Amino acid sequence: MNNNEMLLLKLGEVVLKGQNRRSFEDRLVTNVRRRLKKCGSFQVYVRQSTIYAEPVEGCACDMEAAYRAARQVFGVVSVARAVPCEKTVPAIVETASRYLAEAFARAKSFKVESKRADKNYPMNSIQVSQAVGGDLAERFPSVAVNVHHPDLTVYVEIREKYAYVHAPAVPGAGGLPVGMGGRAVSLLSGGLDSPVSSWMMARRGVELEMVHFVSPPYTSQQAQDKVLELGQLLTAWCGRMLVHIVPFTEIQEEIRRKCPEEYFTIIMRRFMMRLAEAVARRAGARALITGESLGQVASQTMMALAATDDVASMPVLRPLIGMDKVEIIRMAREIGTYETSILPYEDCCTVFTPRHPATRPSLEEVRRAESVLDVEGLVARAMEGESWIRVKP
Ligand code: ATP
Ligand code: MG
C-alpha cells in the first residue's frame, strides 16, 4: 500500500478535437470529479492530455473503488494507478522497487518504458529507461531484462513537477464525455437491448433521460422496479439520470378495442414515439434512442420502422440496428445489465401481442387503422399521468 498512490487517466478522442478540446477536457474533468466523489476526496486536474486524480492529503480514499469508477467514465481510454516521485533516477528506482515489489516478485523478466513530457529534462526517454532499468536489474537479480516480451513493464513518465511510476494501464470506457453530445431520451424497456443501446449513445457523449411505459394492471410493479434497476446500473457509466414513467394502459386498451389485430404492435410503437417525443421536448432533448435491431421482431422490419418513424419529428437513433443478438448479449454482460434484463417480468410490449403481426405494413394502411383513435387526447392524458424518478450511482 502506498499512500500517495493516484490515478492517471488518458484522454481519448477528446485529444483530437482541436478548438473544442478545452471544453471536452473541462467536461471530462467535471465528470471524473463527480464519479470519484463517492470514493473519497480527490483533487482532479488535467495536464497534457492526462487527467490526474490525487487523493487529498489525509483523506482515506478507496483507491480500488476509484480505479473501477474511473474505468467507467466515457472519454477515458486508459487508467493507470501510479505513484509520483522526485524526478531523479535514484528516486524513480526507489519508488518503482517499492511500489512494484509484488509484480517484480512474480515476474521473470521486465523492461522500463519512459516518456518525457518535460522536454527540458536533462535525459531523454531512452536514457531514463536505461538508467532506471539498469539499477532495477541490480536490485532484482532474478528478474532479467527483456525488451521484447517482458512479463512486467515499468512505466516512467517524466512530467512537469514529478516523475510518475506505474504498471501497465488498463483500458478505460473510451468514447466521449457524457454531456458533449447533447441530450436524448432513451426508450428503456426491461429487455436486453435498450440498456445496451442507451449505453452506446452515452458512450458517444449523449446525456440521457429515460422513458419507460407501464401498463398496470397488465404490467407489474416488479417490472417497473426492474427498469429502475437497469437505469441505476447505467448510472455507473452515465451518472445520475431521470427515468420518466408514462402510463400506457389506456392507449393499449383503446388500440385493442378499435384497431385490427395485425397492427396492434406497430400502432403501439407509434404512440411510444409520440410520447417519448413529448418527454424529450420538455427535457430539451434533441433525439430519441431505441434498442431496435433490423429484423429482430415483426415491428423491426424496414417497413415497420418506417411506419414508426412516420410520427417522429426528431431523429430516432438505433445504435443496435446492425447488430446480432449474440453481440448484444455479450455487450449486456460487459456493461453489467444482463442479469437484470433476463429477470422474467412482462413488458407492455408483451401484453396484447397479435398472433400474426403485420411485417410489411404500408404507411397508408397503418395510418388508416389508427385514424379511428383520438390520438391527441390519448397522448395528452398519458402525459398528464407522467411521473419521474431520479436514479443515482
Ligand atoms: P428490448 O430488449 O430493449 O426490450 P425488444 O427486442 O424486446 O427490445 P421491442 O419490445 O419491440 O424489442 O421494443 C423495441 C424498443 O422499443 C426497445 O428496445 C425499447 O427501446 C422500446 N420499448 C419497448 N418497450 C418499452 C417500454 N415498455 N418502455 C419504453 N420503451 C420501450
Ligand atoms: Mg422488449
Image (cartoon, helix red, strand yellow):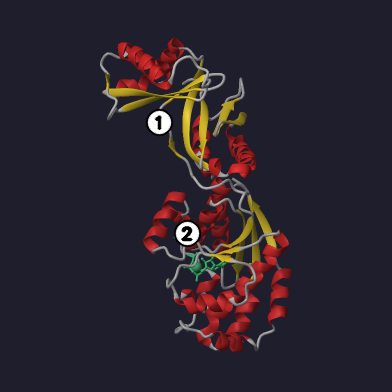
Q: Which residue is mark 2?
A: 341
Label 2 vs 1, first from the N-terminus: 1
Q: Nearer the viewer, mark 2 or mark 1?
A: 1
Which picture quadrant has residue 382?
bottom right
Helix, strand or loop at label 2? It is: helix
Whether residue 259 is visible, yes or no, is no
Question: Would the CB of label 2 be found within 8 Å of ligand 1?
Answer: yes
**Relative to 12, is 47 above or below?**
above
- Say the numbered circle drawn on residue 291: none
The one nearer the camera, 10 or 326, is 10
**Relative to 344, is 165 above or below?**
above
Q: Quadrant of the C terminus?
A: top right
Question: Would the CB of label 1 be found within 8 Å of ligand 1?
Answer: no
- What is the x, y in percent for residue 263? 53, 84
- What is the x, y in percent for residue 26? 64, 39
Three-letter residue code for mark 1 = Pro
Q: Residue at x 53, y 50 (%)?
A: 203
- What is the x, y in percent for residue 222? 55, 61
Q: Residue at x 31, y 23 (%)?
A: 110
Which picture quadrant has residue 113?
top left
Q: What distance separates the C-alpha of mark 2 from that of mark 1?
A: 34 Å
- What is the x, y in percent for residue 292? 49, 67
Three-letter residue code for mark 2 = Ser
Circle 1 packing at 10 Å, graded few (<14), some (14-19), many (20+), is some
Circle 2 packing at 10 Å, graded few (<14), some (14-19), many (20+), is many
The one nearer the camera, 285 or 123, is 123
Helix, strand or loop at label 1? It is: loop
Q: Which residue is mark 1?
A: 168
Whether label 2 touches label 1, CB < 8 Å:
no
Left or right: residue 324 compared with residue 208: left
**Relative to 278, is 155 above or below?**
above
Whether residue 322 is visible, yes or no, is yes
